[in-house]
Amino acid sequence: MIKQFCTLLFGLSISLYANINKEELNKLNVGALLVKDIGSNKMLYAKQEFKEVKPASLTKVITVLIAIEQGNLDRPVTITREMTNVEPTVAGYKPGDVIRLKDLIMAAMIKSDNDAAKAIAIAVGGNEKQFVKMMNAKAKTIGMKHTNFTNPCGYDIRNHYSTPKDLLVMTEYAIKNKQFNNISKMNQHTYFSLNKNKKFLAYTHNRLLNSYEYAVGVKTGYTSKAGPCLIARAKKDGKDCLIVMMNAKENRWKMAEDIFEQVFVPKSLKNG
């Protein structure tokens, strides 16, 4: 009897959560927005989930995931001139620098350095073209049905596109990886080249990691065509919420935090 009562009580406590004001979310000036309760596998809100979008640096989630899954993260990568032929966000590597693959992964995720992402692609794939094939194969394998990648950085190159739903699928797959989670919630990382002892600092563009105590990742993105984008995750009191926000025309950090707070506050408290 006690066990049944506790089970019922737990079920009721969960039902008090994950209640959001959809009318408020409808007013948000964003191109697309998805809010999902990962714990209950319930989509709480969806706007333009199948719209074709430019994923910008959200692309780097699958770039680093492929690198993490192939292992040997301590292997040295010698930076080539081709790897440095990128813009605008860069770590500042020079040809001849030797960087651990793990540090390249952190630089690509935390600071969104494009030279790090391109170095990963060439080191893991042998060349960028082959790595892009790996990206698209991985996307297909994990269920991204309306996505096509043409580069590892997220540039607005022709035929580089996804959908908010596919980006959610990508992230739900990625967060099952412990190493990915550990990296995606870091707000900075200091590392050194292995041969010249040059110091590099990767600092996050994800302001939620510094301002919202429940934030645990995941990735920011921006290009002129994509606009400000964000995949954000937060956890509180056993609740686990994931947001995909595309082309935000308002403050994406405040919008995300407000959404998380709606999800995390019990319904009984919202109703007074």
Image (cartoon, rainbow, N blue to C red):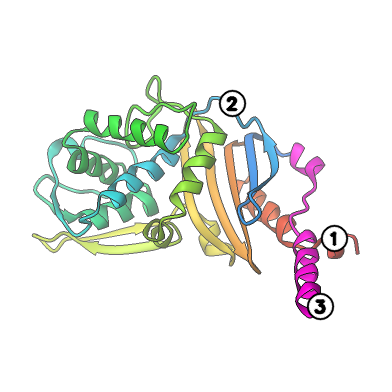
Q: The disc labelled 2 sits on which kind of residue?
A: Lys
Whether residues under marks 1 and 2 lie with C-beta atoms below 8 angstroms apart, the answer is no
Compare residues 227 and 264 and report the one nearer the observer: 264
Q: Tell me the element at label 3.
A: loop
Q: Position of residue 122 (x, y in %)?
A: 19, 38
Which tag is nearer the camera, tag 1 or tag 3?
3
* Residue 217 pos. (x, y %): 49, 56
Whole-angstrom CA distance, mark 1 to mark 2, is 32 Å
Look at the picture and state if 270 lies above or below 84. Answer: below
Residue 270 is marked as 1
Q: Circle 2 — which element?
A: loop
Q: On the rendered structure, is 168 left or right of 131?
A: right
Determine whether, in the image, residue 228 is placed left or right of residue 20.
left
Given residues 124 and 107, the one toward you in this image is 124
User: Residue at point 53% right, 46% down?
Assistant: 231
Q: Earlier in the sequence, mark 3 or mark 2?
A: 3
Report if residue 216 lies within the magenta region: no
**Which quarter of the rendered picture does the N terminus lie within?**
bottom right
Q: Seen from this angle, which residue lies furthest bottom?
A: 2
Q: Which residue is mark 3?
A: 1
Residue 250 in sight in this render: no
Q: Can residue 48 be seen in this snapshot?
A: yes
- Secondary structure under the numbered disc 1 in the rendered image: helix
User: Residue at the location (55% across, 58% down)?
Assistant: 208
Q: Which mark is residue 152?
A: none
Q: Residues within 10 Å of mark 2 (few under 14, many from 20)?
A: some
Residue 51: give its label. Answer: 2
Looking at the picture, how far across and down is residue 171, in whole percent?
49, 46
Q: Image quadrant of residue 241?
A: bottom right
Q: CA distance from mark 1 to mark 3?
A: 31 Å
Q: Position of residue 169 (x, y in %)?
A: 51, 41
- Write down the region rendered in magenta: 1-26
